[in-house]
Image (cartoon, rainbow, N blue to C red):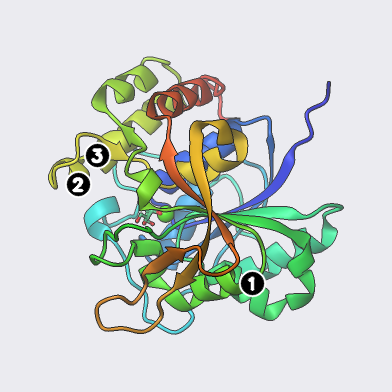
């Protein structure tokens, strides 16, 4: 029986965990990647765009790739070289891009994909939500063509970049506010669940043992990504972004709760906080737990789908 695939646009700031999220998406028979767009976040837009092209080359993603906005809606760019390195994707050598960048900027490529799709498209946003918000501002007429927005971002119980705020939301709180107020169903994978999505060194070796090129590079990405987290006391690599893909392809691995999530855009100490409650109508499905072992197994099975040749 033909599986009905979910049309998706992957928008992120690669970033090691963005790259692994895209690996998972490309490996899944349930998803149809219609476009890839880069966001300013972990590194500058130039670097995340270059990384996006290299990742798509490595994974054999043939969808068009477009460059996102160079800065958040209001703030100056905020990067994270301490986590992802100067390139934004330090570690293993990657192939040079085999494709040219789209001639359209990200927002216009997203709009074209939505216009041309016969059915609503899901946005998978694993960086600051700048492009998604800009799309909603520039093309309100296309809102109905967005089925839902699955994000990695926020944290109901805590932050990581500040005590109150997680990096993706803090980098562009105004954008997140636009997305969460849009009325489009949001699936939120915040730190509550992504810090349970720990991949341990034993898992790195299971992935490496698969033995193909993508498996080796994913294991190298995990090693690099884990280094920062090991030094601040994590027992494994908290694999944030792939959970936004797991939400679409294996929701059975997740424990989820409908919530009203509101974004703090003011405040000296709490700017970028995602405040979750049940005092208003729910605007998001919030992931709060994950079957970690099942998640690790899913990653191992995903890398097995990549042969020695670039796909
Ligand atoms: O806070 C984690 C998030 O910030 C992840 O998306 C990671 O890639 C960085 O963008
Ligand atoms: Ca990211």
**Callout 3: CB less than 8 Å from ligand 1:** no
Look at 47% across and 42% down and name the residue there: 243
Task: Give the label, 2 or 1, closer to the camera.
Answer: 1
Q: Give the number of the disc on residue 226.
A: 3
**28 lies left or right of 170:** right
Residue 301's spot in the image, x, y percent?
51, 20
Q: Is residue 308 above or below residue 146?
A: above
Tag 1 residue: 182
- Which element carries disc 3, helix, strand or loop? helix
Tag 2 residue: 228
- Which element carries disc 1, helix, strand or loop? loop
Q: Is residue 168 above or below residue 18?
A: below
Mark 2 and mark 3 in contact? Answer it, CB < 8 Å. yes
Residue 306's spot in the image, x, y percent?
54, 24
Look at 42% across and 16% down and name the residue there: 210
Look at 24% across and 78% down and name the residue there: 269
Q: Is residue 234 above or below residue 157?
A: above
Task: Give the label, 1 or 3, closer to the camera.
Answer: 1
């Amino acid at each position: 029986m033909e599986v009905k695939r979910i049309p998706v646009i992957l928008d992120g700031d690669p970033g090691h965990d963005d790259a692994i999220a895209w690996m998972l998406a490309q490996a899944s028979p349930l998803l149809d990647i219609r476009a890839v767009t880069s966001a300013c976040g972990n590194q500058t837009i130039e670097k995340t765009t270059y990384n996006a092209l290299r990742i798509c080359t490595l994974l054999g993603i043939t969808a068009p790739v477009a460059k996102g906005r160079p800065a958040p809606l209001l703030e100056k760019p905020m990067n994270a070289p301490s986590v992802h390195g100067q390139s934004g994707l330090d570690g293993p050598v990657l192939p040079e891009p085999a494709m040219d960048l789209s001639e359209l900027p990200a927002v216009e490529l997203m709009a074209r994909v939505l216009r041309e799709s016969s059915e609503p498209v899901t946005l998978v946003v694993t960086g600051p939500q700048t492009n998604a918000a800009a799309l909603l501002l520039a093309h309100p007429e296309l809102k109905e063509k967005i089925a839902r927005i699955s994000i990695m971002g926020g944290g109901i119980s805590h932050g990581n970049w500040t005590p109150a705020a997680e990096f993706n939301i803090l980098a562009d709180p105004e954008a997140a506010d636009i997305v969460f107020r849009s009325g489009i169903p949001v699936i939120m994978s915040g730190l509550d669940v992504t810090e349970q999505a720990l991949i341990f060194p034993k898992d790195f070796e299971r992935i490496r043992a698969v033995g193909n090129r993508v498996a080796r590079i994913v294991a190298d990405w995990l090693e690099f990504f884990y280094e920062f987290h090991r030094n601040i006391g994590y027992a494994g690599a908290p694999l944030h972004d792939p959970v936004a893909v797991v939400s679409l392809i294996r929701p059975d691995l997740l424990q989820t709760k409908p919530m009203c999530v509101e974004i703090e855009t003011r405040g000296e100490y709490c700017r970028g906080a995602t405040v979750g409650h049940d005092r208003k109508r729910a605007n998001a499905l919030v992931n709060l737990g994950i079957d970690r072992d099942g998640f690790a197994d899913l990653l191992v099975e995903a890398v097995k789908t990549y042969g020695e040749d670039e796909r």
